[in-house]
Amino acid sequence: MTNSGGVSPVGFVDVQPLVNQVDGNGKSIPHGIIYHLPYFRVQGGADAIIIDPKVGDIGLAAFASRDISAVKNSKKVSNPSSSRKFDWADGLYFGGFLNGTPTQYIQFSSSGIKLHSSIKITVEAPLVDVNATTFSVNANTVLNGTITQGAGGGGGAANLIGPLTVANNVTGQGTSLHTHVHSGVQSGGSNTGQPTI
């Protein structure tokens, strides 16, 4: 196997046929390993779902009617490199048959779509749009960047249960929460009363 999930061109696998040959006396004759078969990936142009085969996967090997070695090397229209026909050297691997329960998956069901990972999910893009009636985050959340609410002119209220701790200043309608002063009071050692709700 030449790839292991990285961002790279489609690779090759070595496959072991699982169904033995049987001679006239009923004796089983195991097949040898078939080397360097291109494997199938869901891909169109530069867009792909990268799920490379792993050791132990069970799949299907199909065999071309002519020598495909020149096409494997050039990835272009080519003449067959030899006169061989239906040879195991001209095989292609399609994975995903009879495999076990996945631990990372995209699940489609009548209740919706679920994206699950037991390790980590990373979304990378210059721009990510989420269009939803409700967007819920059930986790501790770290935001590294500027937050702009109502950038399109829609506005809307922000409701927080808190407590809310802000390390730096808070400004509301141009007034600083940290440095603003109150007029109409006499300076001295007394404090103002608590704010009313």
Image: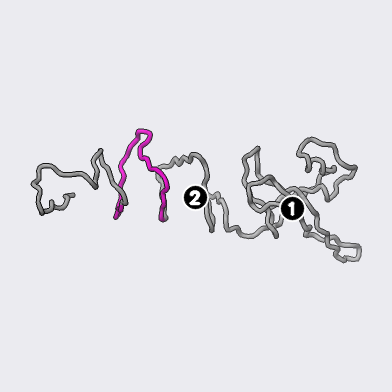
Residue 76 colored magenta?
no
Measured Cα–Cα span from mark 2 to mark 1: 37 Å
Measuring 82% from the left and 36% from the top, which residue is drawn there?
78
Q: Amino acid type of disc 2?
A: Ser
Where residue 166 appears, as percent x and y from the top left, is 31, 51
Most common SS among magenta residues: loop
Give the magenta part as a residue range.
140-165
Ranked by sequence position, the earlier of labels 2 and 1 is: 1
Q: Quadrant of residue 100?
A: bottom right
Quarter residue 146 falls in? top left
Horizontal arrangement in the rendering, residue 150 relative to residue 189 (left or right): right
Element type at marker 1? strand
Q: Position of residue 130 (x, y in %)?
A: 45, 41
Categorize mark 2 by other alpha carbons within 10 Å: few (<14), some (14-19), many (20+): few
Disc 1: CA contacts within 10 A as few (<14), some (14-19) or many (>=20) = many
Residue in the foreground of this view, choosing between 69 and 84: 69
Q: Which residue is mark 1?
A: 13
| Mark seen at residue 111 | 2
Q: Amino acid at mark 1?
A: Val
Q: Residue at x 76, y 39 (%)?
A: 75
